[in-house]
Image (cartoon, helix red, strand yellow):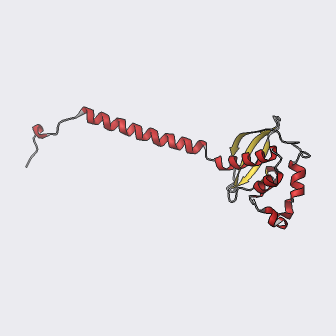
Amino acid sequence: MTTVLMDAPFYDAAKVRRRKVRFAQILGAILLVAAVVWWFRFWPQEHVVNQFLTACEQQQYESAYGIWMADPDWQKHPEKYARYTFDNFHKDWGGGGELGLIRSHKIETSERPEGSTTGVVVIVTVNGRNEKAHLFVADSDKSISFWRDFLY
């Protein structure tokens, strides 16, 4: 049996146009979702740093130390953190440190250091200073440390 040209299906321009529009909408939605995911890829690390600095601003240093160490129950086992004790932490962040008493902060950006697969550096302006603070947030437990500790 042969098909004759007269038996060809009717060309529906509206159906083709709807298909193209639907494809463009799906592609646009995928690109939008990808852009949002990319834009907020370091949000968990930035959120932890924001919580930490907010606790420092409110002078809640025990809570801030718990965020720094990613252990809210650190007071039950302080010997676990002998490498960076609460006293040393309080000297650094309690007003006597390099940044002084923290009154304000603004998260500028975040980036994964070249060659690092273990964490993210969050760059923060503290107290409106020109020199930015660089805090390293570990991917594994969201503990915070000074970025300079990882430079050597």
Please determine whether, in this image, residue 18 is positioned above or below residue 50.
above
Q: Which percent across, then down, holds residue 125?
A: 78, 38
Q: Residue furthest right?
A: 96
Indicate whether 118 appears above or below 34. below
Left or right of 29? Residue 83 is right
Relative depth, front residue between 37 and 62: 62
Report whether residue 92 is seen.
Answer: yes
Q: Is residue 21 left or right of residue 64?
A: left
Of 36 and 20, the residue lying toward us: 36
Answer above or below: position of 7 versus 115: above
Residue closest to the eye, 118 or 80 = 80
Residue pictured at 52% horizontal, 44% vertical: 34
Q: Position of residue 118 (x, y in %)?
A: 69, 57
Quadrant of the image containing the C terminus: bottom right
Task: Kindly identify the residue that appears in the image at 77 percent across and 58 percent down.
Answer: 69
Give the x, y percent position of residue 7. 11, 40
Residue lying farthest to the left in this orientation: 1
Res. 42 in view: no
